[in-house]
Image (tube, grey):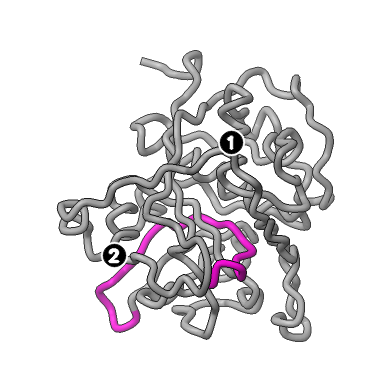
């Protein structure tokens, strides 16, 4: 099992805030399926794409003092899964996953497949308004309040890797053109990356040395777009450190070098609204 440091340490400059992270690989009962990337999908992928400008994402979130990036990334993936299914996007409860998913570790870290498995096994996920976040301010997972919400508003119907994940080593040969095709087809992707040096980032295309090695990943976020047309091609990533960090809560990572492991573990979710929340 990979144990991740939850806070930025030596990489942060003096006076720079430390931000919680929290990616910890969890044992998995089954192999996660990898979606097919066809030649037609590669050819059809646009040269630039921004799902966050098309209504496919909710507002930037803040995990605060809790090492719950995995739950935020998973929740954001489910929200975007609703959009991609042609249904109304809902802001969903990260707190339910943090407090009630007993396979993962709450504020002590967790993983994406196990988070999705929890939501499937629980019969769905509540809205943020019915089960609001408390862990970000307190830095504690909190107790599971199964009767907190009126009902689950969304369900996970499936999840896959968008491209083949890296399973060991430096992960230097990941398929970034396939990642573009997967995004164009399936929408925003939940990804896990190496964010050890991200704390001081304020803007621009981040091209500093940033290992994408299998054992260097420590943070899960949402990949929402890319632009391959300019002099500095980049991936657009939505973080969970509030909108005051980076570029309104986003960071741009250099394309073509698997910067910070952006293409190591990229997943998409299929989701649907619960029957009572679907209006005709």
Nearer-the-camera pick, 109 or 82: 109
* Image location of residue 153, percent across then percent down: 55, 24
Question: In the visual, does 207 lie left or right of 198?
Answer: left
Q: Quadrant of residue 248?
A: bottom right
Q: Quadrant of the N terminus?
A: bottom right
Q: Secondary structure at mark 1?
A: loop
Q: Quadrant of residue 42?
A: bottom left
Residue drawn at the location 68% of the way across and 49% of the way down = 110
Nearer-the-camera pick, 213 or 233: 213
Residue 177 marker: 2
Residue 221 on the magenta segment: yes
Q: Secondary structure at mark 2?
A: helix
* Image location of residue 225, percent across then percent down: 38, 60
Q: Quadrant of the C terminus?
A: top left
Q: Which residues are magenta?
A: 213-232
**Residue at mark 1:** 92
């Amino acid at each position: 099992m990979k144990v991740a440091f939850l806070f930025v340490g030596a990489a942060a400059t003096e006076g720079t805030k430390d931000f919680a992270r929290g990616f910890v690989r969890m044992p998995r009962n089954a192999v996660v399926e990898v979606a097919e990337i066809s030649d037609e999908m590669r050819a059809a992928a646009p040269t630039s794409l921004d799902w966050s400008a098309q209504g496919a994402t909710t507002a930037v979130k803040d995990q605060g003092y809790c090492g719950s990036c995995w739950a935020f990334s998973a929740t954001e993936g489910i929200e975007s899964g609703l959009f991609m299914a042609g249904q109304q996007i809902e802001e969903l409860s990260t707190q339910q996953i943090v407090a009630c998913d007993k396979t993962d570790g709450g504020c002590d870290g967790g993983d994406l497949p196990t988070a999705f498995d929890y939501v499937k096994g629980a019969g769905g996920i509540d809205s943020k308004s019915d089960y609001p976040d408390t862990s970000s301010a307190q830095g504690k997972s909190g107790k599971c309040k199964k009767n907190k919400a009126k009902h689950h508003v969304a369900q996970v119907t499936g999840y896959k890797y968008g491209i083949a994940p890296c399973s060991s080593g430096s992960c230097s040969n990941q398929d970034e053109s396939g990642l573009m095709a997967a995004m164009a087809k399936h929408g925003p992707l939940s990804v896990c990356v190496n964010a050890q040096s991200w704390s001081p980032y304020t803007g621009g295309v981040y091209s500093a040395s940033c290992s994408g090695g299998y054992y260097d990943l420590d943070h899960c976020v949402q990949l929402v777009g890319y632009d391959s047309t300019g002099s500095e091609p980049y991936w657009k990533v939505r973080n969970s450190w509030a909108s005051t960090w980076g570029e309104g809560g986003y960071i741009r990572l250099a394309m073509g070098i698997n910067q910070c492991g952006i293409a190591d573990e990229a997943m998409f979710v299929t989701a649907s609204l619960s029957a009572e929340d679907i209006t005709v």
